[in-house]
């Protein structure tokens, strides 16, 4: 594609898909003003959004310093997605002290003690390229680095567990049936090789090499290796106590962080992630809520999505991003903003938003 063709294509996407944030903020003069090596880097970053016009972000970083290097474009997209107004500097506060925040969902309604809660953070190691730019060898070497850290984590009485790999020939390899069982249990990530967004970005390359998951004995602390970010570190529980959920993640993150090479972190962007949506706290904290009334038994997410959006929440289907709701109205509700908001604020948004949605569901 020539520069003229690229610019024309992005313009076309901007008209037909105004929610594609890359197309919305792409500035041809900025692109044309870059030297050839930088233009080539930027083309790779935006390739997924150029090809997949219905992308909501439309860009993936390939290296941690892409955010600083291409700030004139990426900052505009980041402000738009995370709701950071022009004039307010982009900056990431960290605050894990959730003790002063109301956190017991069961106090809203005893039924909410049954909801499944999940909180994950995205983390990437500074010494490797981001997943979209990794070679097959780097993916496997990174998995070895992670597996060595997990071998030490397994000795910890609170976080003991096992590493499960889907890399062919790995000493930790699990079979296809075990992998499918873990996916169905919402623990392991889905096969990425059919994902058109991740394919164009190179993130799903060399599938399934370098991919796996650590799972604690109680199956409440999990770490993905080789998905959209080097690591997705998460805690999953039922019982409605968001404070306990967060504490579990925070403890595990600190212990695991000490066992791994340094994460790519920035004062401005927080945790560096492949997708600009996941910068900052890198955190997505979600509830699996049954909302049959608001979703017309899972058949129509229009109303719930609108109500959720006005409270800063996003709605996904029961199987994660790009999936459908369950017939019982089961949906995944989580705060959208992850940058410019602390961990504690994200938890508060989820609690307040869930309480409001539940009030609408049960009127
Ligand atoms: P993310 O991108 O935040 O890591 P995805 O949308 O890709 O998450 O979903 C990953 C998996 O986690 C899916 O199986 C999804 O159903 C599951 N999941 C998400 N939130 C919850 C939750 N609160 N309880 C149980 N499973 C969940
Ligand atoms: Mg995902």
Image: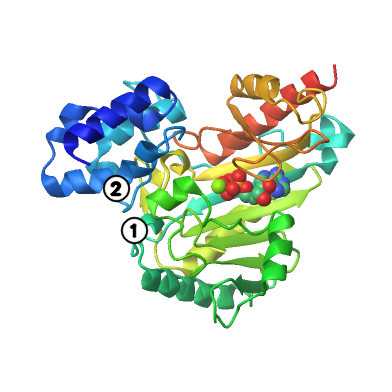
Of the numbered discs 2 and 1, the one sitting upstream in the chain is 2
**CA distance for labels 2 and 1:** 9 Å
Residue 287: x and y, percent?
Answer: 71, 39
- Figure label count: 2
Name the side, left or right, on which 24 lies relative to 120.
left
Which residue sits at x=71%, y=69%?
Answer: 178
- Rate crowding at label 2 as few (under 14), some (14 to 19) or many (20 or more) other CA atoms within 10 Å: many
Name the side, left or right, on which 29 lies relative to 226.
left
- Residue furthest to the top in view is 363
Name the side, left or right, on which 225 lies relative to 287.
left
The C terminus - image quarter: top right
> Is any part of residue 26 visible from this angle?
no
- The relative height of residue 356 versus residue 161 in the rendered view (above or below) is above
The reply to whether the C-beta atoms of the residues labelled 2 and 1 are less than 8 Å apart is yes
Please say which color scheme the image uses.
rainbow
| Residue identifier under label 1 | 133
| Residue identifier under label 2 | 44
> Is any part of residue 46 visible from this angle?
yes
Residue 146: x and y, percent?
Answer: 49, 71
């Amino acid at each position: 594609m020539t520069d003229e063709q690229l610019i024309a294509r992005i313009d076309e996407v901007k008209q037909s898909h105004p929610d594609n944030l890359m197309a919305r903020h792409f500035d041809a003069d900025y692109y044309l003003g870059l030297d050839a090596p930088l233009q080539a880097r930027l083309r790779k970053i935006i390739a997924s959004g150029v090809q997949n016009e219905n992308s909501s972000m439309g860009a993936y970083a390939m290296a941690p310093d892409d955010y600083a290097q291409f700030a004139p474009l990426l900052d505009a997209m980041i402000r738009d997605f995370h709701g950071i107004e022009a004039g307010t500097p982009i900056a990431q506060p960290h605050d894990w002290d959730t003790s002063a925040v109301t956190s017991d969902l069961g106090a809203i309604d005893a039924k909410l003690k049954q909801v499944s809660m999940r909180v994950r953070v995205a983390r990437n190691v500074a010494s490797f390229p981001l997943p979209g730019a990794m070679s097959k060898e780097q993916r496997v070497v990174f998995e070895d680095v992670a597996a060595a850290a997990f071998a030490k984590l397994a000795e910890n009485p609170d976080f003991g567990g096992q590493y499960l790999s889907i890399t062919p020939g790995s000493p930790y390899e699990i079979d296809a049936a075990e992998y499918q069982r873990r996916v169905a249990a919402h623990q392991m990530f889905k096969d990425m090789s059919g994902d058109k967004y991740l394919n164009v970005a190179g993130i799903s390359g060399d599938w399934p090499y370098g991919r796996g998951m650590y799972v604690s004995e109680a199956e409440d602390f999990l770490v993905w290796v080789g998905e959209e970010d080097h690591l997705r570190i998460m805690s999953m529980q039922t019982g409605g106590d968001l404070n306990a959920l967060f504490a579990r993640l925070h403890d595990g993150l600190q212990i695991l962080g000490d066992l791994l090479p340094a994460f790519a972190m920035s004062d401005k962007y927080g945790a560096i992630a492949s997708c600009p949506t996941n910068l900052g706290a890198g955190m997505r904290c979600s509830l699996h809520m049954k909302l049959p009334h608001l979703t017309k038994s899972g058949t129509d997410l229009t109303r719930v999505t609108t109500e959720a959006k006005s409270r800063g929440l996003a709605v996904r289907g029961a199987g994660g991003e790009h999936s459908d709701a369950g017939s019982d109205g089961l949906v995944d509700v989580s705060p959208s903003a992850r940058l410019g908001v602390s961990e504690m604020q994200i938890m508060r948004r989820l609690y307040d938003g869930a309480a409001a949605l539940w009030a609408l569901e049960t009127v």
